[in-house]
Amino acid sequence: MGGLWTGLVCGVATGAAIGLAAMYGWGRGRARRAEALFDISMQLNSTLNRREQMELIMNTAKRVLPVEAASVLLVDPSTNELFFELAQGDKGEQVREIRLQHGEGIAGHVASSGQSVIVNDAGSDPRWSNRVAERTGFVTRNLLTVPILNRGRVEGVLQVINRIGKSGFTKKDRQLLENVARPMAVALENARLYAQAEESLAALRNTTAIKERLESELQVAGTIQMSFLPRTMPSSHEPYDVCALLKSAKEVGGDFYNFFKIDEDHLFFALGDVSDKGIPAALFMAVTLTLIKGKMEPGVSPGELLTMVNDELARDNPLVFATIVCGIFDCKTGEVVMSEGGHCTPYVVRATGEIEPIKLRKSLPLAAMEDAVYHDGNLTLGHGDRLLLYTDGITEAENAAQEQYSPARLQQFLEMTPGMSSAETIDALLMHVFMFADGAPQSDDIAVLTLQRK
């Protein structure tokens, strides 16, 4: 359809040129020139490739201005030199390798002045440069050079050499070539805009490909991160009910939890928050959990464990750190030994409904400083009592007014939880937090762990 339309428009243009010739009594040569200019205007729509446009325009112009050679020289904005964008003739390939300095030769003079020049005796003109002739052996008798102007700025020059059938170029030839140069300026502008659009599209495609690859890699990273966490909750036959949940703000995050039995009578549990986000936090989390599980064994207290883990993490001066709270639950007695490193205050919800904040001796976050010492604290869970650990993604969750959920709201919520299971408590807490946020985006990772003595 595009080719048919172009051919139809060109046919109308040709008819219009012939009609104008008849109306105004133009000669055949003038009608041919008008027809050529109409053709050039139509050809601007046939391609957006700069060199192809130049070639089409030159071929059309040469029908009415026969010459031995023709060239288009453009200004290199970085060097102000002229380079041959198009060189038609026997020596075209050799000519295209040459660059002209600013003001060099007839072409350089026209590019500098912005004025057309007719030279019908090249050898006697003082502006003539024979550098092209020496390179190619091409003999120039006469030439016509016109500027390619775009909004008053010289983009380059259009040059034709050795007029065929006449002894030299005329003012009419100059007017024709200047008329040819005008659509060339449009062609250059269109080609430049097209090239910029192509570059932008290529950059967008590249960015999209990178984004898709990163999203895929983040999904894999998220799967790997989750593999470090317990996959199943304990059997209902155990004398405790433990449940935990991690909800990252991004594909991967820095919050973490873990729980596992050290022996038949003791359950270890931990929950923490890495200071960074994304992949770096996930990597630090993985290292921390690996160290915790590798160093936790019977006879090691939570404070001793954190001291050993901190020595390993702080040795390499990492750029991140992790707050943490961990403990060991005695399944027979209900005694809990706990230690913390810069973490949020845990709570105990007694079976009677009383809410108790657990005041542990404060220590530094993991990896914040070498040789840090971590301390143990004790409490006892009665039957039906529940311990709650959480990260600051809970208490610092914000609504649209930038109000925080706060520890006070958390305590008010916990007053409503006696009689709930650990899983029900976590589900209700998340619902309570999200209802408070009222659609505001989650800005931080959230991790929660509850441990209830049956």
Image: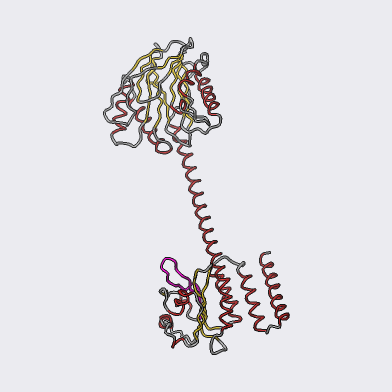
Q: Does the magenta stretch include residue 86?
A: yes
Residue drawn where x is 55% and y is 26% of the image? 435
Q: Does the magenta stretch include residue 437?
A: no
Give the quarter of the figure containing the N terminus: bottom right
Residue drawn where x is 65% and y is 80% of the image? 32
Q: Position of residue 349 (x, y in %)?
A: 46, 15
Q: Which sits in the foreground, 438 or 322? A: 438
Residue segment shown in magenta:
71-89
| Number of marks in the rendered image | 0
The reply, left or right, for residue 403 in relation to residue 344 is right
Q: Position of residue 86 (x, y in %)?
A: 50, 74
Q: Is residue 316 above or below residue 87?
A: above
Q: Which sits in the foreground, 452 or 65? A: 65
Residue projecting furthest to the bottom: 167
Residue 181 position by quadrant: bottom right
The reply, left or right, for residue 29 in relation to residue 395 is right
- Looking at the image, can residue 239 be seen? no
Residue drawn where x is 50% and y is 18% of the image? 412
Q: Is residue 78 above or below residue 167?
A: above
| Colouring of the image | secondary structure
Residue 288 position by quadrant: top left
Q: Position of residue 217 (x, y in %)?
A: 46, 42
The reply, left or right, for residue 65 in relation to residue 83 is right
Q: In this view, does 108 lie above or below 263?
A: below
The reply, left or right, for residue 234 in relation to residue 5 is left
- Looking at the image, can residue 283 be seen? yes
By secondary structure, the bulk of the magenta-drawn segment is best described as strand
Q: Where is residue 147 in the image (x, y as percent from the top left)?
A: 51, 74
